[in-house]
């Protein structure tokens, strides 16, 4: 079974709006990463958040982690058409930070 | 900027034929991963190498799939015989280390269509 599950499955917003997507997982983690995938291409790493961290920022990206709720959220502020992509969370499943899995992803469409 | 190279980018093959994919990771990256991604889904880990050793191949269908990384650098993933259900994107990634504390760098992928 998948460790990470993103929601919503699909999200459509206007340029300039904020986009929020969530990742829930079942078992305790050490690390969680978010990746972006443009249509038909490889994944690109966005941000890593460790289990002892609650929030991280990178440019227009803000990631939060709530280990009590076993969930993480990715916020993209002031979205652009170029942010149109699928976003995946990856979580590890063992004490060594290995044995990790990707969720099914959120497809974000930013309309001009 | 260093990139992970994969070839071919596209492959069409008939079922029961053999097919092979090649990956050249970023220089110095000890860990190499092969993923399969079905359209609309997240990547599924098939095999993970640490240098030339397989550290996780629990999701690799070993009756038809094989992977090797003989000198601990580039890697080949083979399918023999290919089945219709193998149609997917095959992604290679590499990283400095094996845990999720390290960023994975992905190649552009090989899109396989089995007819």
Image (cartoon, rainbow, N blue to C red):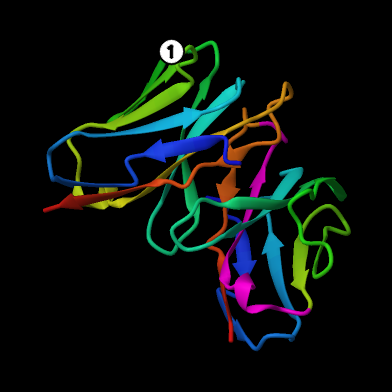
In the displayed structure, does residue A43 sit left or right of residue A100?
A: left
User: Does A56 sit left or right of B76 as displayed?
Assistant: left
Q: Position of residue B30 (x, y in %)?
A: 76, 43
Q: Residue at x 61, y 56 (%)?
A: B4
Q: Chain of mark 1?
A: A
Provide the residue designation for mark 1: A54
Q: State the residue in front, A59 or A85.
A: A85
Give, as a single range, the part of the protein colored magenta: B81-99
Examine the image and state in which quarter residue A95 appears. top right
Q: Is residue B78 left or right of residue A45?
A: right
Between B77 and B38, the residue placed more toward the observer is B38
User: In this rendering, is residue A27 above or below A16?
Assistant: above
Note whether A69 is above or below A44 in the view shown.
above
Position of the N terminus of chain A, as image quadrant, is top right
How dense is the environment of label 1, judged by Cα within 10 Å: few (below 14), some, or many (20 and up)?
few
Could you tell me residue A112's position as x and y percent?
11, 53
User: Where in the figure is residue B72, as x and y percent of width and height?
Assistant: 84, 52
Identify the residue at image location x=60%, y=24%. Answer: A27
- Residue B11 colored in magenta in the image: no
Q: Position of residue A36 (x, y in %)?
A: 41, 46
* Number of disc labels: 1
Find the residue positioned furthest to the front.
A1
> Which residue is pictured at 57% across the width and 47% down the height?
B105
Relative height, residue A28 to residue B68 (above, below): above
Q: Secondary structure at mark 1?
A: loop
């Amino acid at each position: 079974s998948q460790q990470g599950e993103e929601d919503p499955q699909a999200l459509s917003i206007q340029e300039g709006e904020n986009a929020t997507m969530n990742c829930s997982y079942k078992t305790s983690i050490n690390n969680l990463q978010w990746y972006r995938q443009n249509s038909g291409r490889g994944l690109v790493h966005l941000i890593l958040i460790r289990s002892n961290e609650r929030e991280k920022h990178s440019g227009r990206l803000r990631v939060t982690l709530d280990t009590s709720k076993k969930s993480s959220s990715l916020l993209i502020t002031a979205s652009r058409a170029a942010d149109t992509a699928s976003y995946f969370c990856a979580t590890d499943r063992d004490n060594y930070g290995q044995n990790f899995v990707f969720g099914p992803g959120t497809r974000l469409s930013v309309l001009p | 900027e260093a990139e992970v190279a994969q070839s071919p980018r596209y492959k069409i093959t008939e079922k029961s034929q053999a097919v092979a994919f090649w990956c050249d990771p970023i220089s110095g990256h000890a860990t190499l991963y092969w993923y399969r991604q079905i359209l609309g889904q997240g990547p599924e880990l098939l095999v993970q190498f640490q240098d030339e050793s397989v550290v996780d191949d629990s999701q690799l269908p070993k009756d038809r799939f094989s992977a090797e990384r003989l000198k601990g650098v580039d890697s080949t993933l083979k399918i023999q015989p290919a089945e219709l259900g193998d149609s997917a994107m095959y992604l290679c990634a590499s990283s400095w280390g094996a845990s999720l504390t390290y960023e994975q760098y992905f190649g552009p992928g090989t899109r396989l269509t089995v007819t």
